[in-house]
Amino acid sequence: MKRVSKKIRIILFLSIMVLTIVILQNKTDSNSVLPVFKTVEDKTNKCVPILMYHGFTKDDENVESQKVSAKKFESDMKYLYENKYNTIFAKDLSGNIPDKSVVITFDDGYLDNYEVALPILKKYNFKATIFIIGWSVGRDKMLDGQKKINPHFSWEQAKQLIESGLINIENHTYDLHSPEGTSYGYGDNCGLGLSRLKDETDDEYKKRIGQDIKKLKMDIKENLNYTSEVFAYPYGITDKLAVEVLKENGYVIALTTEDRIADILLDDLYLMPRLNVSNDIYVKGLLESELENEFIDQKSY
Ligand SMILES: [Zn+2]
């Protein structure tokens, strides 16, 4: 009896050893498929910073939150230019990406994008992607005509932006963009971005957000004559069903507000992170620290 139990113990021990070796082997294999970057410079070719701006102001003093002054925006663009970054549209993220690419995005479709940012982009021949909110295009007041809002560019101005060759305009929902979760536009209770309403079923949710996304996609087609394929989640809120709805509606890329540099080899195209840029966060410092961090992370694999 004693001898049998000793045998079992030996078999057990050997089995555990074999299992451990197999697990360790698999772990090494999965690690070995990760890209290896030898230098920070090398890493810049695999990471794509997707910069997120909102509004701009001509005045360098008293800059409101979520806005960047013309002077500061110019210094960010100058840094990218001097450091030989290539600007690509967000829609280009699904294709072959040139080395050292950067994506510049502006959210919400403000008139100052046209008046303040476009002339600076033109100076450097830089591209940017603007995410518009359907109901607010061309408006400087709420639908009731009373309450003033930050002015938004019109469809006519949107056409001119597209004709510049430097701007691509994409979908930020027609009317699911309200911090209070109540519609600013035509709808009823819209929820906060793509978050679900209380007691909403999967089908109801998919139908509600699908109708909204489709409506702005149609408006872009009608006014600008191309098919919108990129989406930015208001407030960065997403949901696995939202990704399904985007796919069903022909969207190939969706951007969140997760604040980190995107890795083109590892990140999901429907959950791409963006680096938030404000008036006191300079692109120079942001990119240098992000790339350095990524390099350190990489070395620790
Ligand atoms: Zn927004």
Image (cartoon, grey):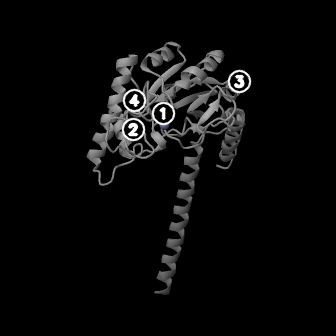
Q: Is residue 116 left or right of residue 249?
A: right
Which of labels 1 and 2 is toward the front? 1
CA–CA distance in space, label 4 to label 3: 32 Å
Sequence-first disc among 2 and 4: 4
Sequence-first disc among 1 and 2: 1
Q: Position of residue 134 (x, y in %)?
A: 39, 29
At label 2, the amino acid type is Tyr
Sequence-first disc among 4 and 1: 4
At label 3, the amino acid type is Lys
**What numbered label is drawn on residue 64?**
none
CA–CA distance in space, label 3 to label 1: 31 Å
Write down the residue under mark 4: 134
At label 4, the amino acid type is Gly
At label 1, the amino acid type is Ile
Residue toward you, 101 or 144: 144
Sequence-first disc among 2 and 3: 3
CA–CA distance in space, label 4 to label 1: 15 Å
Residue toward you, 68 or 229: 68
Which of labels 3 and 1 is toward the front? 1
Write down the residue under mark 1: 149
**What numbered label is drawn on residue 184?**
2
Q: Is residue 205 left or right of residue 255?
A: left
Q: Are marks 1 and 2 in contact (CB under 8 Å)?
A: yes
Write down the residue under mark 3: 78
Residue 96 visible in the current orientation:
no
